[in-house]
Image (cartoon, rainbow, N blue to C red):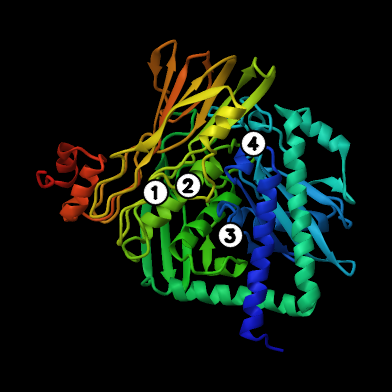
Amino acid sequence: MSIDPITLSVIQSGLQQVCDEMDLSFSRAAFSPVIAEANDRSDGIYSAQDGSLIAQGSQGLPVFVGTMQYSTRVLIEMIGRGEVPAPVEGDIYIVNDPYLGGTHLMDVRFAMPFYRDGDIFCWLSNTGHWPDTGGAVPGGFSASATSVEQEGLRLPPVRLFKQGELDREIYSIICSNIRVADQRIGDVKAQAAALLVGAERLTRILDRYGDGVVKQSIEELRQRAADQMRANVRLIPNGIYRSKAYVDSDGVVNEPLVINLAIEAADGELTFDFSGSSGPCRGPMNSVLATTLSSVYLAMRHIFPEVPISAGAFEPLKVLRPEGTFLDAQYPRPVSGCAAEVSQRVAEAVFAALVEALPDRVTAAPAGSSGNFALGGFDPASEREFVMYQISGGGYGGNSDHDGLSNGCSTIGISKAPPVEIMEQQFPVLYHRYALREGSGGAGRHRGGFGLDYEIELLRGHATASFVMDHGRFGPQGALGGQDGEPNSVTVWQNGKAMVPEHLSKAQDIPLQPGDRVRVGTPGGGGYGPPEEREKDLIEEDVRLGRYSAEEAKAAFGKPPSPV
């Protein structure tokens, strides 16, 4: 029986809406600003057979597309082998083990089987960034960790909820290993509630259209996504496309790491080969396989956003396992920088490789850093410990049609920086500056967008600051003759003396006292096309708005604006 196009479209939209409502419920109920305000989370529906992606929320982080698919498949396999207890209705598993399909330890995944007539119909899963999971430094971003144990508590798949009831013993173990543990119950219950909302909404769809029709629609949607991605990939002439991208350092050894990528296009399929990339590193910039795969998927989603989110969209994309490189981390390699930073370098390498083949679709490199800044300490006003986690945007790369967006979200997601007002209410800090980093975009026919420039002062108590950022040594790559964007910058003032971290954008346990400040400048996007081809009226508009002085504009674009 074939499904008519209208019914298929309605079911597709319905599944998407289920995930969107899970996302919304999760953010609205969560306690932590990184989830409630920044939306660093994602929800999805996954196959009961192999964990393959059925649908994901439109407002969820794209980097979780591949990782939750991978981790759900691993969970199903472990249950099948008897390594994990089989579920009953009402069970919810928790897991954050990076090597079982995750990212870093702070991205905590819940997975719940969804039952129909006593059988598992599918899995509902979500991921939320917890502000702390223990480890050497508040917030988990240890810039100098040399093993995963230093990064926090690692959880294999265990049933945190059993038949709908929270397992207090497991929850106590978690709370005993993390900071500000009293606040985690809000995030835990929000994360579980989002899955229950999804189950309720999915039940309505199945009751209305019938299990058989929905199953058939899911298969049809998967095949159509695969066909659509293959049709798009055929726009790329057959051949091999190469690029390189660089990570500043691993936080321990102050030398760059290289991502060496070759993409082979052949008959509607792309094969991604990362051989020749740097070997496993000592510090936390290793990437687990699930994150590397997801990074490739999200890069192709940026290039072909019209392809529906489904496992079928990934079928024409073949990633050769990058064994022996830092893109295939094995236990106990530290990985706190993999999802937030290394993933964006992988995406940047994909963009750089394909921009000549698809100049109207691919942009110059975006800022490519989540700007991970964690501040942890004691606030005497509230008489409580605190962990503050700040993410920040940067400039997008220029493209064939227009300049890059300024202060946009990171490559890996749509999460936004928490509002300054919320951060100042919850933590003992004062923002002295929060503005565009004007002039930071790479020059080009269409210049890169500008990064962010912010400065924070610790008002009271004591704290330590930690950073795991990137693009401090190399700015985001320009494309087709465009110039690179400005690199990331970090300056810390202690007792009035300025200090730049040895690894530029990576450091940990920097002690701060009241009055000490931290200033961060996030990268600007790369420029697109030769700067001398930029239209004069665009240069004049930038000067009029104060983005460049007349002298800066002349230096950047090779021609001065008209005198006023």
> Is disc 1 placed on a helix, strand or loop?
loop
Q: Residues within 10 Å of mark 1 (few under 14, many from 20)?
A: many
Residue that badge 1 annotates: 366
**Of label 4 and label 3, which has the lower sequence position?**
3
**Of label 4 and label 1, which has the lower sequence position?**
4
Q: Give the left or right position of residue 420, taking residue 490 as reference.
A: right
Residue that badge 3 annotates: 58
Most foreground residue, 516 or 90: 516
Residues under numbered marks 1 and 2 in contact, where contact means CB atoms less than 8 Å apart = yes
Residue that badge 4 annotates: 332
**Of label 1 and label 3, which has the lower sequence position?**
3
- The residue shown at (63%, 31%) is 151
**Separation of disc 1 and disc 3 at Cα?**
21 Å
Q: Residues within 10 Å of mark 3 (few under 14, many from 20)?
A: some
Most foreground residue, 329 or 477: 477
**Separation of disc 4 and disc 1 at Cα?**
31 Å
**Amino acid type at mark 3:** Ser
**Separation of disc 4 and disc 3 at Cα?**
34 Å
- Name of the residue lying farthest toward the left: 563
**Amino acid type at mark 2:** Ser
- Name of the residue lying farthest toward the top: 495
2 or 3: mark nearer the eye = 3
